[in-house]
């Protein structure tokens, strides 16, 4: 592989690589909101067109009951290894729009960063792979076969991708799954994600009286469901930050003292962490560091809570109903279906007689941990060494990509999480951004991964 040719191709095409990404970022592919359905499809069509331009022999939209999956491939020799790239072209809703400094779907560059919804998660990161393929193909340096599976429903739970994967094992056959949808520790400390948390996402409804009541006429004599819901939620985490759902921790993998020590060696500045978030103190499970609380411990968080009067001014009302959306992040070896069941039973059991409760599950997914001694991991490590001049640290991220566990189970391939975002990129938040440095360095690192992976496979 000719590194020089690769680097100069990237250098010469920087502006075009940015312009093309901007085109994708301008289409609001919000998978959660039916209002954007046509835009989601437009984005899929655009990804397909870009794959063909980049050198894929064929590319197609695979229909699902939801948003389409974009599949593309370039097979140069069936006897050579095959890298299967996964990414997602859908994005989170951009709300609240008024908190963005510039419109979320009108990408701009400020301070060497691309600002737009999806710039990092995951259009920017997925597109690096398209440009890496093009760079290798056009400089005559593509060392193996490539397949792309870019989906449009990651941000809503990947339910239809699961069916697609189960029904297309042959089509997706390959030697490694390569994903850029995670973060590195910092641009000075590159890392490879080896752990992702699982997820159980619940919604609850608490009902008191059969109608909204006058809070003076009835207040004090009838339970207020919002007050009750708050008490119930509060009881689910004790003063030490432990979740009180019986059986919740039964399957949680406890790391050895040595493993924990190793994990805490990763550079982490607590003061910087606090000041970046504008908080005076951190809060979490007693006995664990911040890195551990995010990387290896499960959580329970209210993501949204509503009920009663939310309009202008004051309305005296004792509401009939209260609602909350509650997520639990899971760690090995917790199972999201089991946790969903435990939560449901517990929430019903702690409901006092003066209310009734309904519990329903939204999406969920298993946690996953990657080995650091696989050929794929080693190839990724070598790629970082070559492109960044540093050996990457294995790190466990707190986020979730539920489909990763399924890939491993159904397709039986190693997964490499070769992400280049930063925790400070504000993914899912207003003013999401992605560093231009990370975008181009990512493309370079991906090409190095192909080189080392194929060399190591041959050896
Ligand atoms: N790319 C993220 C997950 C992520 C972010 C992993 C940063 C590691 C570091 C992904 O798009 C995402 O947001 N996943 C959701 C779960 C999904 C089921 C909605 C999440 O983690 O909330
Ligand atoms: Mn993502
Ligand atoms: Mn996301």
Image (cartoon, helix red, strand yellow):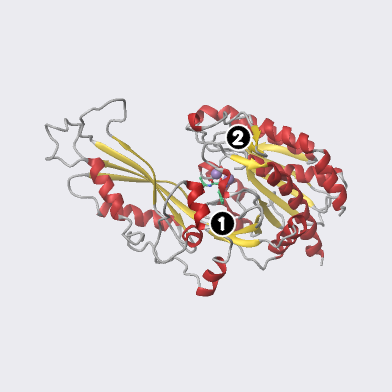
Q: In the image, 346: left or right of 277?
A: left
From what the image shows, is residue 5 above or below residue 61? below
Tell me the quadrant of the picture where the C terminus can be found: bottom right
Which residue is at 62% across, 42% downward? Answer: 120
Q: In the image, 261: left or right of 452?
A: left
The mark tally for this picture is 2
Which residue is at 60% across, 45% downward? Answer: 164
Mark 2 crowd level (few <14, some 14–19, many ≥20, 10 Å Cα)? many
- In which quadrant of the rendered view does residue 196 lie? bottom right
Q: Which residue is mark 2?
A: 116
Nearest to the eye among marks 2 and 1: give it. 2
Ligand 3 location (quadrant): top right
- CA gap between label 2 and label 1 equals 29 Å
Residue at the extreme top: 312
From what the image shows, is residue 119 above or below residue 450? above
Q: In the image, 126: left or right of 201?
A: right
For mark 1, give the secondary structure. helix
Tell me if label 2 and label 1 are in contact, CB under 8 Å.
Answer: no
Q: Evaluate whether residue 151 shows in this view.
A: no
Q: Which residue is mark 1?
A: 405
Mark 1 crowd level (few <14, some 14–19, many ≥20, 10 Å Cα)? many
Q: Evaluate whether residue 390 shows in this view.
A: yes
Tell me the quadrant of the picture where the N terminus can be found: bottom right
């Amino acid at each position: 592989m000719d590194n020089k040719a690769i680097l100069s191709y990237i250098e010469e095409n920087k502006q075009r690589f940015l312009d093309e990404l901007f085109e994708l970022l301008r289409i609001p592919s919000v998978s959660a909101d039916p209002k954007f359905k046509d835009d989601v499809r437009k984005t899929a069509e655009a990804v397909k067109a870009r794959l063909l331009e980049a050198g894929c022999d064929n590319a197609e939209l695979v229909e699902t009951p939801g948003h389409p999956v974009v599949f593309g491939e370039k097979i140069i020799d069936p006897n050579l290894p095959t890298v299967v790239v996964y990414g997602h072209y859908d994005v989170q809703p951009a709300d609240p729009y008024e908190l963005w400094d510039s419109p979320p779907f009108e990408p701009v560059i400020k301070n060497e960063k691309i600002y737009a919804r999806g710039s990092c998660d995951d259009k920017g990161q997925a597109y690096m792979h398209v440009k890496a393929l093009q760079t290798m193909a056009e400089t005559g340096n593509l060392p193996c076969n490539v397949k792309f599976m870019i989906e449009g429903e990651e941000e809503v739970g990947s339910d239809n991708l699961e069916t697609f994967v189960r029904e297309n094992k042959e089509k997706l056959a390959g030697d490694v799954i390569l994903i850029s949808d995670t973060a590195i520790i910092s641009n000075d400390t590159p890392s490879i994600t080896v752990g992702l948390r699982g997820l159980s996402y619940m919604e609850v409804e608490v009902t008191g009286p059969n109608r909204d009541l006058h809070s003076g006429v009835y207040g004090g004599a009838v339970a207020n469901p919002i007050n009750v819901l708050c008490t119930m939620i509060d009881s689910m985490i004790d003063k030490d930050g432990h979740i009180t759902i019986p059986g919740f921790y039964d399957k949680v993998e406890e790391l050895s003292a040595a493993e924990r020590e190793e994990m805490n060696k990763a550079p982490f500045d607590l003061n910087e962490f606090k000041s970046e978030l504008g908080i005076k103190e951190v809060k979490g499970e007693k006995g664990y560091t911040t890195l551990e609380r995010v990387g290896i411990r499960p959580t329970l968080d209210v993501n949204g809570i509503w009920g009663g009067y939310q309009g202008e001014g004051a309305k005296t009302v004792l509401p009939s109903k209260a609602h909350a959306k509650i997520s639990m992040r899971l760690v090995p070896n917790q199972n999201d279906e089991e946790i969903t069941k435990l939560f449901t039973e517990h929430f019903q059991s702690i409901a006092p007689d003066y209310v009734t409760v309904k519990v329903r599950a939204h999406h969920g997914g298993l946690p996953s941990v990657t080995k650091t001694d696989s050929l794929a991991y080693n190839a990724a490590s070598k790629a970082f060494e070559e492109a960044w001049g540093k050996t990457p640290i294995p790190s466990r991220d707190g986020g979730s990509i539920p489909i990763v566990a399924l890939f491993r189970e159904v397709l039986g391939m190693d997964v490499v999480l070769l992400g280049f975002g930063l925790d400070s990129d504000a993914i899912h938040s207003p003013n999401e951004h992605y560093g231009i440095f990370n975008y181009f360095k990512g493309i370079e690192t991906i090409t190095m991964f192909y080189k080392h992976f194929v060399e190591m496979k041959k050896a």
